[in-house]
Image: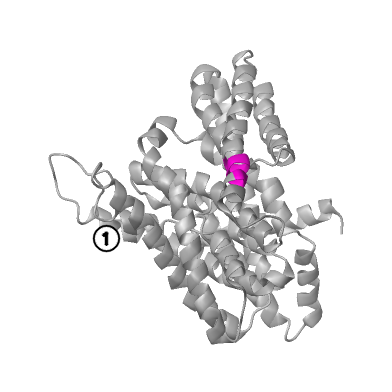
Amino acid sequence: MTIFELAAILLSFAAILGYLNVRYLQLPATIGIMLISLIFSVGLILLGQVFPALTEAAKHIVGQIDFNETLLDVMLSYLLFAGALHVDLSDLSRQRWVITILATAGVVVSTVLIGTAVCFLLPLFGLQFPYLHCLLFGALISPTDPVAVLGILKKAGVPRSLEIKITGESLFNDGIGVVVFLALAGIAAGEHAFDLATVGHLFLVEAVGGVVFGAGVGFVGYHLLRRIDHYQTEVLITLALVTGGYSLAHALHTSGPLAMVVAGLMIGNHGRLFAMSDTTRHHLDLFWELVDEVLNALLFALIGLELLVISYSPKILLLGVLIVPVVVAARFLSVSLPIAILKPFRAFSPGAAKMLTWGGLRGGISVALALSLPEEAGRNTFLALTYVVVVFSIAVQGMTLRPLYDRFVRAPQRPTAKPADT
């Protein structure tokens, strides 16, 4: 089957799911499309008991889609740029210390906590993997996914300050999470020594290099936009900036995700204010909003379809159910620590830790990283566990984010002389 035929099938499938969601469920697109896709996949699996050829044909089609490459090498650059394009840099700057600590130390703490807990749980189910491989699972499941977060926050109705914390962290911590994952993967494969110098060098090249490269690409794009007033060409420039910039970042071995976030922030703030006419702003926003919506629909349709090609057993499902609260607890601890450190210097509302914990959704990036694991590192086991966590995160946490806010943040608030910073 050609790439065009696969794209035609996936686009048609995503369009049908989007229609069903808007027409009947009226859920946030990320949740609704994934849930319908999951139901479709479960239905195909059940039908396979009667018509095995039907299920095998569906598995064959889904198996031809490289989810890891499709997301990390194609979709992610556009989704991150589109998300960062609408983030106000001044709002982000006001929350910079919270976001920085959550996106760095928070990811590392969560990785260690989850990896350690999983290492103790696995033998109870007759499974045994080295501690380093368990840390790999902790690294891939710790970052919150900006694709999932941004899609759901649009409908959740949370206050602006809290939205900036969750959005800002999710935009940056996936890049940090990928760096941690790559460092651990290299150590596990024997490519790197397990020492601070090696890890520090990788962080410098990948993370810091990605930020610097993204700033450079954004600077070039800003100056190109500033010198013309022709919205068709300006939209084309941003499209080339993302496509070419992400490819070049990979070639330079810097973090493409971080580069696109920084470039998106520059174009969305300085570029929007000083380099665009009102007509260009309108068309640019409309274009990237459509790109974001279409790619989100495709991504979450794919997440649901991945159920067809993931191997499960009752033992793995039970282990996955047990790991869900482990992941949530690790997230709570990794969020509570920065809040405790910063509380003497700034005010937080009573429900801040709970909202940041429950709003830290996992999504396609975790699945893509799990798919990149080698077989000897427990790929099938950790992929199945990742899928359980991701489905719970999007379906349960995503759907209950607004009720949680109403209960723990809005309800306890009382009028004060100085409003708390949520």
- Front residue of 47/338: it is 338
Work out which residue is located at the far top of the displayed protein and give it: 227
Q: Residue at x 61, y 44 (%)?
A: 201
Secondary structure character of the magenta stretch overall: helix
Q: Residues within 10 Å of mark 1 (few under 14, many from 20)?
A: few
The image shows residue 10 at horizontal and vertical percentages of 72, 57
Give the side of residue 355 with respect to residue 193, left or right: left
Counting from the top left corner in percent of width and height, residue 286 is at 57, 34
Foreground of the two, 53 or 146: 146
User: Residue 127: horizontal and vertical position, in percent?
Assistant: 61, 82
Please, is residue 15 above or below residue 265 in the view? Answer: below
How many marks are shown on the rendered structure? Answer: 1
205 in the magenta segment: yes
Please name the amino acid that badge 1 sits on.
Arg
Q: Is residue 392 visible?
A: no
Left or right relative to 357: residue 8: right
- x 35%, y 35%: residue: 94
Q: Mark 1 = which residue?
A: 407
Assess whether residue 418 is covered by the magenta stretch: no
Query: In the rendered image of this protein, does residue 272 appear above or below residue 125?
Result: above
Which residues are drawn in magenta?
Answer: 201-207
Q: Residue 81's quadrant in the figure? A: top right
Residue found at x 27% / y 43%? 421
- Give the percent coordinates (x, y) of residue 138: 54, 64
